[in-house]
Image: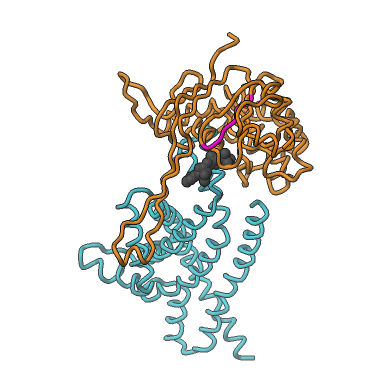
Chain colours: A cyan, B orange
Amino acid sequence: MDFIQNTLAVFPALLQAVPVVVQLALGAMAIALVLGLLVALARISSIKILRGIATLYLEVIRGTPLLVQLVYIFFVLPSIGISIEPVPAGILGLGLNYAAYLSEVFRSAILSVEHGQTEAALSLGYTPSKTLWKVVIPQSFVVSMGPIGNYFIAMIKDTALTSVIAVTEILKTANILNSQTFQTTAIYTAAAILYLIISLPLSRVVVVLERKARASG
Amino acid sequence: MADETIIDVRDVHKTFVSDTKPTLGQRLTGKPHVQKRVEVLKGVDLVVHRGETIAILGSSGSGKSTLLRCINKLETIDAGRIYVNGHLIGYEERDGELIAEKASVTAQKRTDIGFVFQHFNLFLNKTALGNVMAPLRDVKKLSAAEARDVALPNLEMVGLGDKIDNYPSKLSGGQKQRVAIARALAMNPSVMLFDEPTSALDPELVGEVLAVIKKIAQQGTTMVIVTHEMQFARDIADRIVVMDQGVIVEEGPPSRIFTAPQHPKTRALLSRSGILPA
Ligand SMILES: Nc1ncnc2c1ncn2[C@@H]1O[C@H](COP(=O)(O)OP(=O)(O)O)[C@@H](O)[C@H]1O
Ligand SMILES: [Mg+2]
């Protein structure tokens, strides 16, 4: 019973870290969505240099661990004069990383929109770029909803990695508490439960979004 | 002016070049791989006047779709000229030289040409009404209220006044094709092009779409229809055009084409369809 009480007692302290997690996840997601779409467009562009740059970006991000990317941004960039505060560095690192994965989601979603609809739009007088923005991209967003949601949940869990670059998120808060009270089991159990409490409802939302996307398609 | 020319196709040629991937053998031996070239249109001339209904007949692969697609520049021609309503399609003519035009100019010209596809090609994320309103909003820049006012009568006209809020997934093939027709008509084009509008439909749904097309023809809309529905073509066309292997082999009024075809290919086509005795 002590264990349960001790675990519950840790929650108020951990909850203090939730706003930082929200800030990280929302900020990084905004970057990932915009940059991911741009990378996807570059990858399907007819301009070879754009395709090359986008592919290189994708390979570098996917070929290196997120933890290393975060450390790089926070500890290496200052050596060339770019110092970033922990939270913005975390947002940037997570955003750049997830942009690569979301670009693949967008790319396949864009390619999945039937060519017939593109031709219909052109035949109705849409310019090629208007066809892309008004017909193809809105539909690829619908198709992407589920995968984007799943990546968002994964990203929330990955915010834990920013503890190594001095962001006082849930895990870092737990580490600090642990060093003060040594109630290791209670503290990390509470931390794990807190992540679950955040991600479980979100998973339900994703399921609903995916059902909606299928219904309209 | 009764004889006003809407479409003027002059000596149009089109060749498709497909790069076949070199086989492993070709790569190992360094033999150059062959580019596959198919000449699909071999000098086509066609004039369509205002208010006319033209039916294009011809066996599969004769170039009917390609001809229609060239008229609104979904395909680019290699030689010849196509004018729609006096405008050269795909090019600007400066001092007798043809210069490829900007995409926005092509788009502008396309607003004057309605195109109905075999597979409907509705926007799947939009309702029937949304499909018809979209180009009015996005291309013609009408307000939502104005677009609705244009879209609704067109949906009524194709008999879908009660289905305006249905998504394509909740429409039958015939209904989808009627939405597609309403969407093209709502742009108020000078000419409507139909590429086998009933070929993808279950037999019992063909009639409702043909009835709508006939109604539009009777309203005096200029149109070109590629179809395999012989009786329908005979019924509504002012002129029948028969294509074979990239050329027009015969054209004339249905009364003559269907009773006294001159060209062997026309006779073969008609006897295959059971119109002429074999
Ligand atoms: N995009 C393309 N690339 C290569 N060949 C094509 C393409 N489109 C059509 N063709 C070929 O051109 C010929 C005529 O096609 P099409 O115009 O569709 O004929 P139809 O509509 O009369 O059946 C066919 O042999 C077809 O295989
Ligand atoms: Mg065809």
The magenta-colored residue range is B240-245
Which residue sits at x=60%, y=29%?
B263
Q: Is residue B70 left or right of residue B54?
A: left
Q: Quadrant of ligand 2?
A: top right
Q: Is residue B223 magenta?
A: no
Answer whether residue A119 is visible to the viewer in this image.
Answer: no
- Residue A6, x across and y down, in percent: 57, 86
Q: Residue sitting at 44 percent across and 53 percent down?
A: A37
- Position in image of residue A148 (x %, y %): 53, 61
Q: How many marks?
A: 0
Query: For residue A27, which quarter of the picture?
Result: bottom left
Q: Is residue B46 left or right of residue B79?
A: right
Q: Is residue B182 visible?
A: yes
Q: Residue at x 60, y 34 (%)?
A: B265
Report which quarter residue B121 is drawn in.
top right
Residue B89: which quarter of the image? top left
Residue toward you, B195 or A164: B195
Q: Nearer the viewer, residue A14 or B254?
A: B254
Furthest residue toward left: A80
B50 or B177, which is in the foreground?
B50
* Magenta: main secondary structure: strand
Q: Residue at x 67, y 42 (%)?
A: B199
Residue B272: where, in percent of width, then height? 69, 39
Which x, y percent locates residue B212? 73, 30
State the quadrant of the N terminus of chain A.
Answer: bottom right
Which residue is most to the top? B1
Q: Quick check: A118 above or below A212?
A: above
